[in-house]
Image (cartoon, helix red, strand yellow):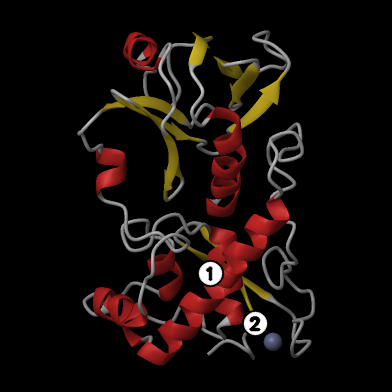
Amino acid sequence: MPELPEVETLKRALTPLVLNKRLLELNFLRKNLRFPIPSSELHKGLLNQKISAITRKGKYILIHAPDGSLLVHLGMSGRVTQAPSMKPMEKHTHALFKFEPNIYLHYIDPRCFGCLLWIPKGNGHPLLDGLGPDPIDQEITAQEMKMAAKNCSTVSIKNFLMDAKRIAGIGNIYACEALFAARIYPKKPARKINVAQWTILLSVLREILQKSIVAGGTTLRDFHSTDGSQGYYKFKLAVYGKENKPCPICNEPIKRIVQSARSTFYCKVCQK
Ligand SMILES: [Zn+2]
């Protein structure tokens, strides 16, 4: 699943390709993804318009034009690739964009959980409104997190980190790796994490996300593999997916548990 670093990588790759460029052609090959694609609004709002900025909020990318923004989400399996023409190159290509002078971008999403939506200028959007602060762009303080977790009586720190209303865009892999790096037991109640622990946790989280962004590269050509699922986590994982493998610190076998239907990997010796 595309995670926050992949989306940041996509933003950085898109910027030199489309910033200050006009969208010359737009073609949708299906009517809906996770939501219906507002084809006529997008044509009206984007065609022949110059892209003024590309921004990211959590795992959403916003491509800004004078009258509004295209909201892009990659869902479970989506990606954007650069192509030589408006002709679909592969199955599951749902949207085709031509920017001046000859930049072709294809939106591909086998599972169709992503979205392409239009936000008129000056409007908010329900998908963005409830998102917590962004761990890459914004300075989140340990004190703020401590306060936010104060009333979460039973929520574990792992589930707290993965709640986009608390912090935007932290997926399962990053939550597991950050908790290991900060030596925090994933089931520990979020309200019991003290300011010193939050300081370490936020710092390792940022470090892991930054490393992953660097590893992600900056071109859309080498950003993906054909199934859209690999090539993302090029940084070395310490615990994620390593059940029964030795902990890199103490050699104890890594444990796997399930929290909110997602696998959590941790070391029972190192994480308290
Ligand atoms: Zn260990």
Q: Residue at x 31, y 40 (%)?
A: 127
Q: Residue at x 74, y 33 (%)?
A: 221
- Pointer 1: what residue? 206
Chain-order first, disc 1 or disc 2: 1
* Displayed quadrant of residue 72: top left
Q: Position of residue 152 (x, y in %)?
A: 26, 74
Q: Quadrant of the N terminus?
A: top right
Q: Image height check: is 147 above or below 32?
A: below
Q: Image height check: is 248 above or below 133?
A: below
Count residues near mark 2 (Cα–Cα under 10 Å), then give few for <14, some for 14-19, many for 20+.
Answer: many
| Amino acid type assigned to the residue bearing label 1 in the image | Arg
Q: 219 and 175: which one is in front?
A: 219
Rounded to the nearest angstrom, the CA distance separating label 1 from label 2 is: 21 Å
Respond yes or no on whether mark 2 lies under 8 Å from ligand 1.
yes
Left or right: where does residue 244 sit relative to residue 29? right
Please say whether residue 233 is visible from this viewpoint: no
Q: 182 and 10: which one is in front?
A: 10
Count residues near mark 1 (Cα–Cα under 10 Å), then give few for <14, some for 14-19, many for 20+.
Answer: some
Element marked by disc 2: loop
Q: 79 and 157: which one is in front?
A: 79
| Amino acid type assigned to the residue bearing label 2 in the image | Cys
Camera-nearest label, 1 or 2: 1
Q: Position of residue 189 (x, y in %)?
A: 37, 80
- Pointer 2: what residue? 267
* Displayed quadrant of residue 111: top right
* Displayed quadrant of residue 230: top right
Q: Quadrant of ligand 1?
A: bottom right
